[in-house]
Image: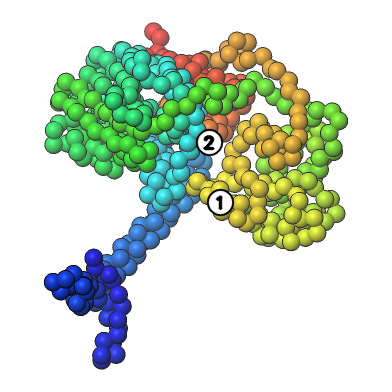
Amino acid sequence: VDYPLAIRHRNGAVMDVLYNASVYRDESGAVAGVFAAARDITERKRAEDELRRAKDQAEAANRAKSVFLATMSHELRTPLNAILGFSDLMRNDPDITDGQRENLEIINRSGGHLLSLINDVLDMAKIEAGRVVMEIKPFDLGALALDITNMLRVRAEEKGLRLTLDQSHELPRFIKGDQDKLRLVIVNLVNNAIKYTNHGEVILRMGIQPEVEDIRLIIEVEDTGVGVSQEDQADIFKPFVQVGKPATQKGTGLGLAIVKEYVQLMGGRIGVESVLDKGSLFRAIIPATSAEEGEVAAPQSVTAQVAGLEPGQPRYRIMIVEDQQENWLLLRRLLEDAGFEVKVAANGEEAVKMFQSYRPGFIWMDRRMPVMDGLEATRRIRALDGGKDVKIVAVTASALTEDRAEILSIGMDDFVRKPYRPMEIFDCMAKHLGVRYVYKQTAPTGVGALVPAAELAGLPATLRRELADGLILGNVERLAELMTRVERQDAALAKSLARHINSFNYLPILKALETSETNFKEPAP
Ligand code: ADP
């Protein structure tokens, strides 16, 4: 065996050597001496160190680039949403000419395309910056597959394609894994299959690899579409690569790159087999572990709403620290309606002052504020008398996946991401304060209220498409953003739509959206 050692040369220089020693024995077997050799590896070690340094540097630079990109894309989205929102609006103006309306449609469509590009770049950048964390939880895989198929079937049938789900009987119904990422992977593959197929069918096949101990999910999406030539097959998973006839390109070229990254993050791999003009078969193999039905969190009773506090509990004093009026107005109303006592501080400095007189038991702390931000305010409050006992929960709007550990390390108890659903707020307070609520059961929206199909048809085409994509992916954040655009168009529609969305009643909305799209293209004679 070689032992690495640092030794001092006779000339005083320190050098790295690999040292190797063995004993030799005389005829009787007694140790007669030691043979030792040291090989000078100073040069080799220096080269290795240099290489490692260069690699570290390159990795750090790459991470910095990705963080920059992620932040940048987030900043770009805000003004772009204004462009989209106002071009949506102007289109309803009765005074504009047909020519102007056409120009507005182009602005709107281009803006929509730009937004999906930015969203995809943001997703890629987050992955590359190492900001995407896996959230492993037990979930109902069977329900996921069925839900995706039902949602996308609307889209397939609109093109005259058949979409079927072929589920192996060996497929475990419940597994532990990252449900949202798996959903995105399957949705992207099936969406592509529909996009690049004009006749025939698309099959989503779900099974497991036999004869291996752990579960390996096999997800196959097969279509009878345009296919991908042999030489292009390796390239389509690279960012921005689009192949085939230019007329058939309809996306950003990032979809499959993101899919591949996600599959790899989950520890799996993905490939394609395809024959041009015959069809394609995308196959992903992803490791998972099985779960029991009991472990799967019961789907939050989506029709339940907090009616108030259960009687006989201590009086809870809550402080909201938030500079933006529209945000604190909403949160204050929510909490006061439930029966909490609430005060608002407009920034960190006010919060520190108010804490000493008001003595809240719970603080909702915005992170970014003028004068003093949420982190600094938390640090100061924690240092005050009684400041260790108050529960402080951050409300963050960051585009990047917040590192839970970082939030906890600065002394906060938890965080909730904006935009939040009311139940998230109440659940968080129940978790940290032990508050108990009484609930009111509202009529499930699906039964009572109808989806306003005619009004949905009046929305701009780009917005309808984006809404449909948001619903299929179940992307709550993006849906909230889109709802503000719907609100500018038609406040009443936004309100009734919000009721359906808040109770996860997605499929009827989707059906209405995709049907109105057909109506839009082929107006009744
Ligand atoms: P895009 O946004 O262009 O769809 P993707 O990364 O999802 O980007 O796909 C990259 C390219 O791979 C597409 O532009 C298309 O040429 C090809 N492709 C993807 N899926 C299929 C499919 N099911 N059938 C044929 N070609 C496909």
**Between 363 and 245, which is closer to the camera in this rendering?**
363
- Is residue 181 shown above or below 502? below
Q: Quadrant of the N terminus?
A: bottom left
Mark number displayed over residue 405: 1
* Type of amino acid at the residue the image marks with label 1: Ala
Looking at the image, can residue 94 be seen? no
- Determine which quarter of the picture holds residue 288: top left
Residue ID at (73%, 20%): 440
User: Most extreme residue toward the bottom, as rendered?
Assistant: 11
- Determine which quarter of the picture holds residue 115: top left
Tell me the crowding category of disc 2: few under 14, some 14 to 19, or many 20 or more residues within 10 angstroms, Cα based.
Answer: some
Q: Which residue is mark 2?
A: 477
Looking at the image, can residue 263 be seen? yes
Looking at the picture, how far across and down is residue 45, in whole percent? 26, 72
SS at badge 1? helix
User: Most extreme residue toward the front, as rendered?
Assistant: 28
Residue ID at (72%, 58%): 382
Q: Quadrant of the C terminus?
A: top left
Q: Nearer the viewer, mark 1 or mark 2?
A: 1
Looking at the picture, how far across and down is residue 182, in whole percent? 40, 31
**Between 212 and 60, which is closer to the camera in this rendering?**
212
